[in-house]
Amino acid sequence: MKKKILAGLLALTMAAGLISGCAKTKDQNDGSKDSTATSGAENPSGDNGGKNTASKYQTTYGSKKFDNVSITVELFDRSNAPKGSTITDNRWTKYVKQEMNKVGINVEFIPVSRGDEVTKMQAMMASGTAPDITLTYTYAYAEQYFKQGGIWDLSQFIDGEDQAKNLKAYVGQDVLDIARSTDNALYGVVAKRAITAKSNLFIRKDWLDKLNLQIPITPDELYNVIDKMKNNNPDARNTTIGAIIFNAWNTKLAFSKLAGSEKDMAIAYGDDAIADYYDPGNREYYRFMNKLYNNGLLNQEYYAMTEDNFKSDIVTGDVGFFECNVNYAVDVMRGSLLKTLQENVPGADIVSIPPLKNVNDGKQYSASYAPGGLIAFAPLTASAEKVEAAVTYLDWMSTKEGGFTLYHGIEGEHFNYDADGVPVVKDADYNAKDKDWIRADLFLTGNQGYFNSVEDFSAATAKEAPGFEDHVAANYENALTGTLVYDPTYTSPSTSNLITDIGLVRDDYTVQVVTCPTDKFDATYDKYMKELKDAGIQKIIDERAEYFDGVYGK
């Protein structure tokens, strides 16, 4: 029987340099204190669930009083702190420190720009200055650092029955095991996603209505709509940008020739370059983009666009169509872009649309996240005692007093429970200024919020955008329409050695194939494929094919 997998798209570009610091053969007990369980909320008897001996490392919050141990924790900085606060000094970082001080742990936050986090992480790991809890969304980095002997095996801090009880209960074994090696080592703690919805196609609904256009359902229809929005703009804007494809997840799937095969998609979508080489349909996706670009319907400097530029184009009313993260247009964490647009352009509206029908089989496919989000890992530069405290910190994050409070706030001030026990926002504007700007980056064991079920997530999230509840509901519905294509999490053995060179080829040619003259497209794309082959991409594909043959069968 074919075995179905849940998986997660990896941006696999790896650091070229070796990790400095300790080798994996280092005594991982160095600097720790041999401790036994004391009374605590999760294990008041200290008997390890009936066993006579408690685990050496006590990581369930409240099971041990630490002796004034200090840990450093990476914190993504989005430069969005409200007046009177900073990313490291605010109501919620103070709350974290207060709660951790109760068990003898001092927390120091290390801010890292969200847009520069990979480069910064690589530099800190190479220099031996990475925080005791370091973060990334690319599991391959953490896995490779572990293989190089640069980070801790966390299994000795988590796997015991009396260890990290809250963490294991909230995240769940399946998500935790995403960072599990074949020899049962655990190189990080993966955050649980509240929902796997990933991407939306967004369009200016008011422009559709003014131009008497229907919602497009195929790539050709989308092209025609973008063309009319650009060249017959009803707002008489000379600066109108027809389209911006900020993340091309679902648009690519509309051209894929492999989308109907779970195994082929798992092989292909380990990296954009692998998909370009392995999925012949991607040539037609890039041809579509080339056509948009050469006819002036695509942002002419899309390849150099920052997220701030992207948001600015949306809120000033210049964009007719874009693809980006699910719920992006009304997400309070991303600035409630539609609300700002409507303040600037009264009557404007942005809605999401269902995924386009695939040009090959007429079906709809939606890119979906794996069940895991970011991964937190501990560099080997941290002592065992610090790692014990760091895992205790992640365990606290998984409690109601921890992650739930950081994300939802305080009952009566930030939310009230509805009849079904779901937290419902009281005042979205107040919450946005008080906590929403930092909540997702402080909460490390969950992505998209502290929720126990998809139903709870849906009910609560819709209430966070007053006036746009229908938009939120439609966004998540559209993002989960059709066949879901989950991101794979597998990293082949040769990936870390080859992916840097492959990434350089990809970054160069994915701009060239979009911006080259139309009559040069096929020749340019052929060069792209040859360069990928010369960089060794076939070896990675062969390894992935062998692995997924074992999962799905040949």
Image (tube, grey):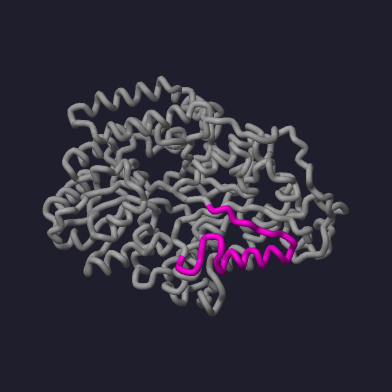
Q: Is residue 386 left or right of residue 450?
A: right
Residues 198 and 483: in front is 198
Where are the magenta residues, as a range?
82-111
Q: Position of residue 297 (x, y in %)?
A: 19, 45
At 46% across and 39% down in the image, what residue appears?
11
The answer to which image quadrant residue 527 occupies is: top left
* Residue 495 picture location, percent across and down: 51, 29
Which residue is at a point 42% across and 51% down the rendered structure image?
198
Is any part of residue 119 visible from this angle?
A: yes
> Is 259 drawn above or below residue 330 in the view shown?
above
Q: Quadrant of residue 124?
A: top right
Q: Is residue 39 left or right of residue 97?
A: right
Query: What is the quadrant of residue 162 in the picture?
Result: bottom right
Residue depicted at x 62% and y 49%: 133
- Where does residue 241 sit, x and y in percent of width and height? 21, 51
Q: Which quadrant is home to the N terminus? A: top right
Instruction: Residue at 33% x, 30% y: name it.
Output: 509
Residue placed farthest to the right in the image?
A: 52
Answer above or below: position of 251 versus 313. above
